[in-house]
Image (spheres, rainbow, N blue to C red):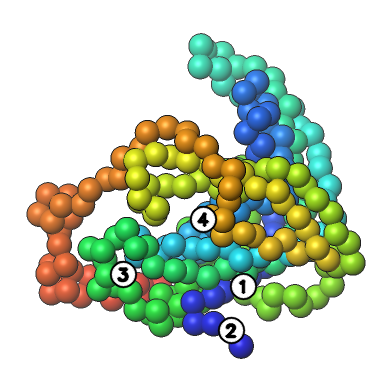
Amino acid sequence: MEKKNSISFRLYGRTALFSDPITRAGGEKFTYMIPTYQALKGVCESIYWKPTIIWVVDRVRIMNPIRTESKGMRVSKMSGGNDLSIYMYLINPEYQVEAHFEWNEQREDLAHDRVENKHYFISKRMLERGGRRDIFLGARECQGYVEPCKFGECKGYYDDESMSFGVMVHGINYPDEIGGEKLQTRLWNAQMKNGIIDFIRPEECTMVTDTVDYKTKEFVPGKNFSGLEEFEREGWFDAMDDAAL
C-alpha cells in the first residue's frame, strides 16, 4: 500500500551526466555509471518542492543497460576564448525511483504548512503533469522526463545481477536542512542488488567532508518575508499550490 508521503516514478531521457567531481578539475566531465542520491533528490524537487519539506530518495532501479558515449565539447575558458573538452555521457538511461518527503525541522517558521495530505496530493498532480520545473539528468544539457509508475513493474536489464560501483558521491549537506554553518559532501559505497540500489539515509553516511563555510539565509517578517498573517489573509498558500500548470 502506497504511503501518503511517497511517490514512485519512471525517469528517462536520451542522455545523462552524473559527473564525477574528480574528473572536473581538468575541465572535462565523466559520468558515474548510476545516478547519485543528490541528482535524484533534485529531480524530486523539480517535480514538486517547498521549503517545508525535504525529499528522501529510498531506492532506484536500473532499467536499461549502462552504456556510455564520449563527445567533444567546445567550452568557454575563463581567460577568454574556448577549448575542446571530452565529456562522457550515459546513453538512453531509464530508471524507476521511489522517494518520500519529510518535514524540514530547521524551518520552524513553516510549521503551520506541515499538512501531509496537502503536499502528497500536490506532488502526485505535479508528477502526472511531468513536473513543476524542467527535469535534468545530472546536467543542464541532459533533458529528462518523468511519469508515474509502480516501482518494480516491467522487466529491468539487471534484474538478476548485482555489482559494486565503489566509493562515489552520495550528496550534499546543506545547513538549511541539517543546521550548522558548513556545506558538506557525503560519500558512500554504492551497491546494486538484482538491479536495485537501496540508498542509505544522508545521516547514515560515514564519509563526510566539510566543503566551504555556508550560512543559512534568514527570513525576517517585514524585511524579506511578508509573514504568515499576510499569506493567510490573502489565501496565498492555497492559490499557489492549487494552480494548474
Residue flagged by tag 3: what amino acid is it? Met
Residue 170: give x, y in percent of width and height. Answer: 61, 48
- Please tell me which of labels 2 and 3 falls first in the chain: 2
Q: Going 49% across and 82% down the picture, which residue do you hit?
A: 4
The kind of secondary structure element at disc 4 is: helix
Residue position for label 4: 203
Residue flagged by tag 1: what amino acid is it? Ser
2 or 3: mark nearer the eye: 2
Report how far apart the C-alphas of labels 1 and 3 lie in the structure.
24 Å
Q: Going 18% across and 55% down the picture, which residue do you hit?
A: 225
Q: Nearer the viewer, residue 101 or 8?
A: 101
Residue flagged by tag 4: what amino acid is it? Glu
Q: Going 72% across and 61% down the picture, which residue do you hit?
A: 197
Q: Going 83% across and 66% down the picture, which residue do you hit?
A: 194
Residue position for label 1: 8
Residue position for label 3: 240
Residue position for label 2: 2
